[in-house]
Each structure stands twice: as C-alpha cells, then as structure tokens.
Amino acid sequence: MMNIINKKFTYAVIGASNNIKKYGYKIVKDLVQSGFNVVPINPHEQQVQNLQAYQTIKQINKKIDVVVFVVPPKVTTKILPQLKEQNITKAWMQPGSESEEAIKYCEENEIKCMHDACIMIERLK
C-alpha cells in the first residue's frame, strides 16, 4: 500500500476532533488504539483524545512521515504547501478530502498521495 502504513511512522491528522461523530475523531482513535504514533492537528483544540494538539504542521518539532487529511478539499489544498516546506513526502486524503487540484499538487511536488481509500480499512489489509 505505497509504504504509507507503517507503525514506525508518525501520522499527523489534519482535522483531528474530539467530536465522536466526526471522522477526525474516529481516525485518531482507530490509529492510536492500533499502536500508531499520532499527532492531532486542529487549530481550535489544545488536546484531542488526550494527545497534545497542534494548530499547524509547522509547530510540530518531530519528524512527520504521513499527513492524513480529514478536512474539506479546499482546506487540503491550502495546507499541502506546508508539507513541501516541512519535507513531508506522504499524504493520505481520506474520502471527501481530496480534489483533482490537491492530487495534482502532490504529483507535481513529489508527494506520494493516497486517495479514494480509508486508512482505517487499508491498515487492516
């Protein structure tokens, strides 16, 4: 699966949430319970599910291997340049967070991009 799912990786989840109805909550919970290292990104939260949350990727002072997007496509497209700035080369766009523009940006900037797949399902394979 494009070497994007690996328990040695650190995953930043953009759109991480404390709202149990949102996928930003479900994905953080699923990855953490499965033994993955997760860093929540949410500009409106101090913590997400007892993990320190960050407002932006730039604030994180450890290596991020994969950024998981659980936000509207407009937000994904706006944040993608930060991956390039931070030398992050893998992105996972959850269903509903991708756009042709975002996918094209990844292709043009050597960011491996997973889309049209849910990380919670793919990690089980």
Image (cartoon, rainbow, N blue to C red):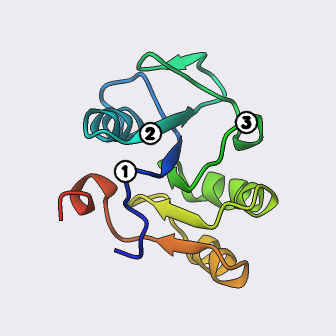
Q: Residue 95: name its quadrant.
A: bottom left
Q: Which residue is mark 2?
A: 37
Residue type marked 3: Asn
Q: How far from the left and from the top, in percent, is residue 83?
A: 71, 58
Judged left or right of residue 33, residue 72 is: right
- Residue at the outermost left position: 125
Residue type marked 1: Lys
**Residue at 54 percent of width and 63 percent of height:** 91
Q: Nearer the viewer, residue 121 or 74?
A: 121
Which callout, 2 or 1, points at the residue further toward the start of the chain? 1
State the SS at label 1. Answer: loop
Judged left or right of residue 10, residue 85 is: right
Q: Is residue 61 above or below residue 53?
A: below
Q: Are marks 2 and 1 in contact (CB under 8 Å)?
A: yes
Q: Nearer the viewer, residue 123 or 77?
A: 123
Q: Which residue is mark 1?
A: 7
